[in-house]
Every structure is written in C-alpha cells, then in structure tokens.
Image (spheres, helix red, strand yellow):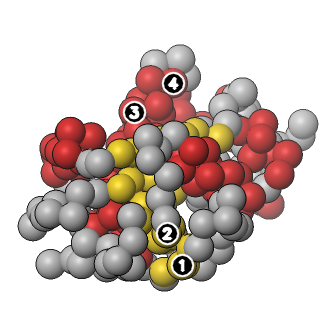
Amino acid sequence: MLALQYNTNLLECGTDEAGRGCLAGPVTAAAVILKKDFSNEVLNDSKKLSLKNRNTLREVIEQEALSFGVAHIMMKKIDEINILNASILAMHKAIEQLKCLPEHIAVDGNKFKPFQEIPHECIIKGDGKYLNIAAASILAKTHRDEFMTKIDAEFPQYQWKKNKGYPTKAHREAIKNFGPTKYHRQSFKLLPDQLSLDL
C-alpha cells in the first residue's frame, strides 16, 4: 500500500506528467490534493495498471480529491521551449488550477522549477510511492490518452488510438509514408537516421 503523501503535516499536492517520450501530441500534467482520510488499494503508478483500472480510478480521484488540475502543453510550445521545460510548465499550469494553494508539492521525477514560493520535493518513481503522485499520474495519463484518441479520428493512419503518439514501429512507418502532421513535435527525431525524410 502506498503512503498518502510525502509530507504528512502539510496540505500537499502530488504532480506528474504523461507523454514526455511521444513523437506526437501534447505533454500532459496533473496535480492532485487528496483528503487526509483517502485510501485506495488499487491506486498505483498508472503504468502498472490496466486501462479499465485507470479509467475507474480517474472517476474515483475526480470525485473524491480535495482538488485536482490537468493541463496540456501543445506541440508548438514543446518545440519552442523543449520537452523538459514543457513538462514542468504543464505541472505548474495544473497546480495553478487547484482550488486551494498547496503548502508543499511532491513531484514525480528529478527535475522541477519552483512554483511561486511553495517548497517542493522531487521523488524518483514517486508515482509508485505516494498516493497523491499516483493519482496525478492516472489523471495525466487518462486525459492525455483521451486527447490522442480524439485526434486519431482526424489522422487514423498513425494509429494514435493504439500507440498514443509513442514511437512504435507502426507510428514511425506511418511518418515515413505520410510525413508528419500538425500534431507531431517537429523538434523530435521523428525517424531514425536511416529512414530520414526529405523535408
């Protein structure tokens, strides 16, 4: 069972992002403040859960959290400021949406920039240690997957419904055959060198 949060004495939000390694689509982050008495035996790092469990947990979190926020940073901005800065910006934007300002921020991973003057802690694999970060990982993942499923209808040949924009063989093959779309991150290496496009 995961601990509720990193700093037990303060009003803390957990934050995490999804989609950093994708070739297409936004990077999405969520921030979640859980109630002190929140508990859930299924909640864990979103990557360890089935689609069904993630979707069920999303409903539970959105109904039972004290507050939550979700933010997408789009491809143009990712290309402008790079993926690491875009991931941190997404987390900041998600925290801005919280109804109450947290006294402490628990961040999944090892990189963050101060948000206002609120103290924070970066925790490697935090989504497998604390419920508030795990909850943020679920919301970031499910909201991003929902976005990718929507744009899949516009460009079905890239199979985003299936690969969510990650660099699978089929996704790279489609880029090779059809070229990049407005949803592709132009600053990313869309194809390995041996398959490079003549743009």
Residue 68 lies in quadrant: top left
According to the picture, the residue beneath numbered tag 3 turns out to be 146
Residue at 77% across / 41% down in the picture?
A: 77
Labelled pair 2, 1 in contact (Cβ < 8 Å): yes
The disc at residue 151 is: 4
Q: Is residue 142 above or below residue 192?
A: above
Q: Amino acid at mark 4?
A: Ile
Disc nearer the start of the sequence (4/3)? 3
According to the picture, the residue beneath numbered tag 2 turns out to be 104
Looking at the rendered image, the disc whose residue lies closer to the viewer, 4 or 2, is 2
Tell me if I can see residue 145 in this picture: no
Q: Amino acid at mark 3?
A: Glu
Q: Amino acid at mark 2?
A: His
In space, the residues marked 1 and 4 are separated at their CA atoms by 35 Å
Front-lying residue, 199 or 37: 37
* Numbered disc total: 4
Local SS, label 1: strand
In space, the residues marked 4 and 2 are separated at their CA atoms by 35 Å
Crowding at dot 4, Cα within 10 Å, few <14 / some 14-19 / many 20+, comes out as some
Q: Is residue 158 above or below residue 54?
A: above
View extreme (right): residue = 199
Local SS, label 2: strand
Labelled pair 1, 4 in contact (Cβ < 8 Å): no
Residue 179 image point, x, y percent: 73, 32
Crowding at dot 1, Cα within 10 Å, few <14 / some 14-19 / many 20+, comes out as some
**Drawn side of residue 85 relative to residue 150, left or right:** right
